[in-house]
Image (cartoon, rainbow, N blue to C red):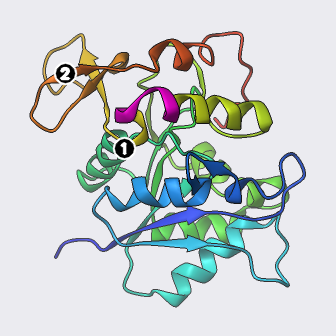
Amino acid sequence: MPQMILTVIQARDGGTRFPGKIRADICGQSMLARVVERVSLIGLPFVVAMPHPDDNENDVLTRFVRLARGNPLVDAFVRITADCPLLDVSLAGYCVNLYRAGGTDFVGTTPEMDGLDCEVFSRTALLTCDLAAHGRAREHVTRWMRRNLSPTLVNWAPEPLRWSVDDESGLDFVRQVYRSCDLCAHAIPHHTNSATGIGGGDRILCVDLHQVESGGLEECRAADILRTRMGAKWKYESMA
């Protein structure tokens, strides 16, 4: 029997670094609406998970557990954060397919993929994490899973990315990308290359090319902008 998988867009209107960012305009739509646009292309049912008024915003794990208990037929969850308006739909689909192939309770992108973050985990993994995780591990939701469940990790970044929206400079960056490249704005996936051949697991994003629906390739007109937030100069917190 096929597994039922639910995509959860994790969002909040508060926060300390950039409160209200999910409502920020990106070329005519809010950032949250842009993320919803992309998630809708993954082809799975999805919900937006906002904290209840009486919730502790730093205990995001409880938000996911509440969703799981309210949806007892769901076998697994895809976690997407609302600050990733450049989410690559093909990457998310790849993570889902890796999970469906079996052998692991957790598939997720590495920290180098900041802004393209996607995680898929089983109901069992989520409920076990709820029992075991404490403190900041509950804010980051999957930190305990990454450390304890022999995860399958995906890294397509040619260099570390910083494509999420954490502050005003990140928002300005995303707006520039949307204005410069219609293909980026419409969630057309970037092309990937594999050193081991077609279908290889060692894919690398080709930032200067998009894979269009016809099967051909088209130039990414925002490639130079995207590269301004790539490279080892960006520091990221390891979730391993």
Q: Is residue 204 above or below residue 105?
A: above
> Is label 1 in a helix, a strand or a loop?
loop
Residue occupied by mark 2: 217
Most frequent secondary structure within the magenta stretch: helix
> Which of the 4 quarters of the picture holds residue 7?
bottom left
Please tell me how crowded label 1 is: few (under 14), some (14-19), or many (20+) other residues with Cα within 10 Å.
Answer: few
Q: Quadrant of the N terminus?
A: bottom left
Residue 239 drawn in magenta: no
- Residue 56's spot in the image, x, y percent? 85, 73
Q: Is residue 47 left or right of residue 236?
A: left
Q: Does label 1 or label 2 sit earlier along the sequence?
A: 1
Residue occupied by mark 1: 186
Q: Which residues are magenta?
A: 178-183
Residue 179 drawn in magenta: yes
- Residue 121's spot in the image, x, y percent? 46, 59
> Is label 2 in a helix, a strand or a loop?
strand
88, 61: nearer the viewer: 88
How far apart are labels 1 and 2 at the CA level?
15 Å
Three-letter amino acid code of the residue under disc 2: Leu
Three-letter amino acid code of the residue under disc 1: His
